[in-house]
Image (tube, helix red, strand yellow):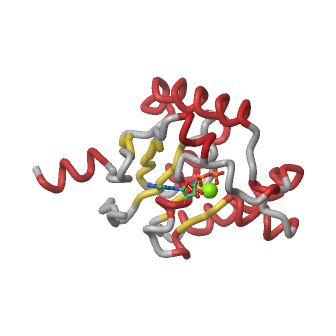
Amino acid sequence: LIYPEMPERSLVVLIGPSGAGKSTIARTWPASQVLSLDALREVVSDDAGDQDATGDAVAALHLLLEARMRRRLFTVVDATNVTRAAREPLVAAAKRHDMLPIAVMVATPGSVCIERQGPRPANRTVPEATVIKQRQDMVDSHRTLKAEGFPEIVFSDSLYRLLPFLERLSG
Ligand code: ATP
Ligand code: MG
């Protein structure tokens, strides 16, 4: 994976369905810079797949994000983030502290996202219908991202190159 060059005062919001490869991309940054909703589900409930723990995990994520934004620290949010409701508090936290929100759309084909559920442990398998819905929500999101407060929208291609940034670096 190519280590993506991004402005230091950024909040990277990964957007994509389960299986798209968000956590794989997130691992290109130092672990301390990544807030993972799955990891926080595990922190609060001992089970990364426990959907009943989502509310508490989101609350923890928002608390940690605020602490990092206040320090102007580069941060990546690893969660599906396919709805405006999920993204709004993230953008708000960035804005409060003059950080740049960057949306990274992980636009892996739906069929690939579904195939990747197969080998996963049972507690981490997302049903096919849910993956399809998440992917459609991501596609529908694209139209509103600018208005939501993301001046930068990046697409990861199948090699996980982050396209506009690489073009800018080489051009
Ligand atoms: P979730 O929302 O469920 O956490 P995710 O978007 O974080 O999903 P990953 O866990 O990063 O998805 O990737 C899903 C699976 O696909 C993993 O097994 C991972 O190893 C594999 N994968 C990710 N990126 C690639 C790639 N570029 N080539 C091949 N396999 C990949
Ligand atoms: Mg993940």
- Quarter of the image with the N terminus is bottom left
Residue 3 locus on image (x, y percent):
34, 66
- Front-lying residue, 39 or 88: 39
> Relative to residue 57, is residue 35 drawn left or right?
left
Q: Residue at x 41, y 52 (%)?
A: 100
Residue 75 locus on image (x, y percent):
50, 63
> Relative to residue 165, is residue 74 drawn left or right?
right
Can you tell which quarter of the image residue 48 is in?
bottom right
- Front-lying residue, 31 or 22: 22
Q: Tell how many labels.
A: 0
> Relative to residue 167, is residue 103 drawn left or right?
right
Q: Residue at x 76, y 60 (%)?
A: 121
Can you tell which quarter of the image residue 98 is in?
bottom left
Residue 142 locus on image (x, y percent):
47, 29
- Front-lying residue, 41 or 121: 121
Q: Residue at x 58, y 52 (%)?
A: 93
Ligand 2's quadrant is bottom right
